Each structure stands twice: as structure tokens, then as C-alpha cells.
Image (cartoon, rainbow, N blue to C red):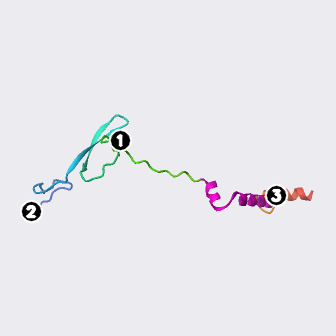
Amino acid sequence: MAERTLRGARLGGQSFEDERGIEFAARQQVGYHCKQGHDFEVTMSVEADIPAVWECPRCGAEALSTAGIEPEAKVEKPARTHWDMLLERRSEKELEDILKERLELLRGGEIGPAHLHRANRKKRVS
């Protein structure tokens, strides 16, 4: 029985395929240089778009291509604040009117924290 058992290869073991008859894709070496002074090369396909920036494998900093490819300038939008978004919905005149109305309600004790209303009632009664 032991003679008829199949013997398998271990996991992650060797491949039984050879490289005869296989045509590899054309490759190129692309050089990069990081700010820390590290130089390294990355193997890429000839057909690949070469990135201008690559992460340095030694220090993790950004490395620029030595082939003279410049990184694209990113168009950054200015940060929109709460005030900017508010002005998209209302004019300053409308906001001033709303503020006056809300201040009158607050001072009259109709809105706002309860502890302020109790204090106002005591002052009015006295």
C-alpha cells in the first residue's frame, strides 16, 4: 500500500515548470534618487507609464526619477470654511436680520438655556 501512495511537494515548494518556450515582457530599469541620498532602480515594463515619484525602499521618503520626469502639480482647492458655506446660502444682510431677531428672543427669555430664563423672571418680579 505504501508503494502506491502519491508523494506530493511541500507547500510553497519548487515549481515543476521550466522557463523553456516562455517569452518575457520587455523590461527597463528606472532609476530614482531620494532626499536622503539613496539611489535605487526599479524594474518596470517598457510599456508602463513611468511615475515621477517612488517611495524609497530604505527610508520611505519620496524619491524623484533620475530620468528627468517631473511630478505633476496638483491643483488644490482652497479650504471652505463654515462661513463660506453660510454665505453661499444667505447674504450678510439676511444674516444680520436673523441675528437681531434671535438676540431679541434670547433677551426676552423665549429661547436659550433654562437657567437664564429663571434668572430673568426673578429680576422682572422684583
Residue for badge 3: 107
Label whose residue precedes the other's in the sequence (2 or 3): 2
Task: Give me the C-alpha separation between circle 2 and circle 1.
Answer: 58 Å
Q: Is residue 67 left or right of residue 81?
A: left
What's drawn in magenta, residue-wise? 81-106
* The one of 8 and 22 positioned closer to us in this rendering: 22
Closer to the camera, 81 or 111?
Answer: 81
Disc ID at residue 63: 1
Residue that appears at 74% across and 61% down: 98
Q: Which residue is mark 2?
A: 2
Residues at marks 2 and 3 touching, judged by CB atoms closer than 8 Å: no
Q: Residue furthest right?
A: 126
Residue at horizontal 18 percent and vertical 55 percent from the top: 10
Does 84 appear in magenta?
yes
What residue is shown at x 25% (from left), y 53% (from top)?
A: 47
Q: Which mark is residue 95?
A: none
Residue 27 position in % (x across, y down): 21, 49
Q: Is residue 64 left or right of residue 4?
A: right
Mark 2 neighbour class, 10 Å CA radius: few under 14, some 14 to 19, many 20 or more: few
Name which residue type carries label 3. Answer: Arg
> What is the secondary structure assignment of the residue under circle 1?
strand
Q: Earlier in the sequence, mark 2 or mark 1?
A: 2
